[in-house]
Image (cartoon, helix red, strand yellow):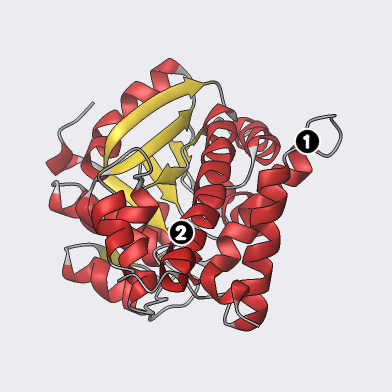
Amino acid sequence: MTSASHEKVAFLGMGIMGAAMAANLAKAGFKVNVWNRTANNTGIEQATKAGCTKFGTIAEAVKDCQLIFSCVSDVKDVEEVLTGPQGVMEAATAGSIVIDTSTIGPEAAKKIGSLLAKKQIHFIDAPVSGGDIGAQNGTLTFMVGASAADFEKAHAAFKAMGKTIQLCGPIGAGQALKLCNQILCAVNMVAVTESILLAQKFELDPKLVPEVLGTGAGGSWALANLGPRINNADFAPAFMLKHMLKDLRLVHEEVEASNLSLPGMQLATIMFEQAADNSSESNGTQAMILGYKN
């Protein structure tokens, strides 16, 4: 593998996560081409300030790139960008590696990997966890589904953006573990929200919940990072409600044909839906507390 300073990569999707990830690649010395469906947004500005070069089409962005990252919203968006008309499959060089960091579920990842393979394009599914803070600080967790050879070729780029990079198995395995992660995140948000509500009922200072309980057995990433945002009525997204609802939909789709019952996931879904009804789907997941208000 060439050194980062000589490696040209593409990054498609300049949302909250993608822009910060692309910026960290550039800071690590990679030559980063970026593209976004909306030509001018704050993400594009963030990435270009960090040294990335923006392009108006996917074909221009991926030209001569051996690593091509994508981070977009839902399954249909990933399919459009990677395998649709004027997408990556039509423009990427044979032998290049496409790395999708979105959450799309294992079946969609396997389908996309199979389509790309017909053009001799390799595929890695590498969903992430860590929110906007992890993306900005380069401390994301990557759950990777790939061949060992492709994983090794992409490892230096992963290290520029994340702290924990785990090969979970073949294509689809990263997505499978990410859905397990989303259950932890979703159900944990129920616990964080309800513990803050109970503290309010007891007329305690709600700041005590993250500050004190966060040091004990009930501590979690959500409590430490989102608990203070709840207390400050700050619902700016680290991870949007609408994206969590999409991820829980994927979990439901994966288990609906089985006998597996996940009542905690179902409860969390109801509370996120109520929060979205009472606010905006673009709020962060900490806005779950709005779902408890009449």
Residue at the image position 41 percent from the left and 60 percent from the top: 60
Circle 1 crowding by C-alpha within 10 Å: few under 14, some 14–19, many from 20:
few
Residue 144, quarter of picture = top left
Which residue is at the front of the view, 61 or 134?
134
Quadrant location, the N terminus: top left
Residue 220, quarter of picture = top left
Residue at the image position 23 percent from the left and 58 percent from the top: 23
Circle 2 crowding by C-alpha within 10 Å: few under 14, some 14–19, many from 20:
some
In the rendered view, tell whether residue 112 sits above or below residue 285: above
x and y, in percent, of residue 113 in the image: 61, 34
As drawn, the residue found furthest toward the top would be 148
Question: Is any part of residue 185 visible from this angle?
Answer: yes
Q: Is residue 137 left or right of residue 252?
A: left
As drawn, the residue found furthest toward the front would be 202
Residue at the image position 17 percent from the left and 39 percent from the top: 4
Amino acid type indicated by mark 2: Ser
Residue at the image position 51 percent from the left and 61 percent from the top: 194
Secondary structure, mark 1, is loop
Residue 195 — which label? 2
Where does label 1 land, which residue? 261
In the rendered view, tell whether residue 8 sits above or below residue 271: above
| Sequence-wise first label, 1 or 2 | 2
Quadrant location, the C terminus: bottom right
x and y, in percent, of residue 43 in the image: 34, 71
Q: Across the whole image, how many numbered discs are drawn on residues?
A: 2
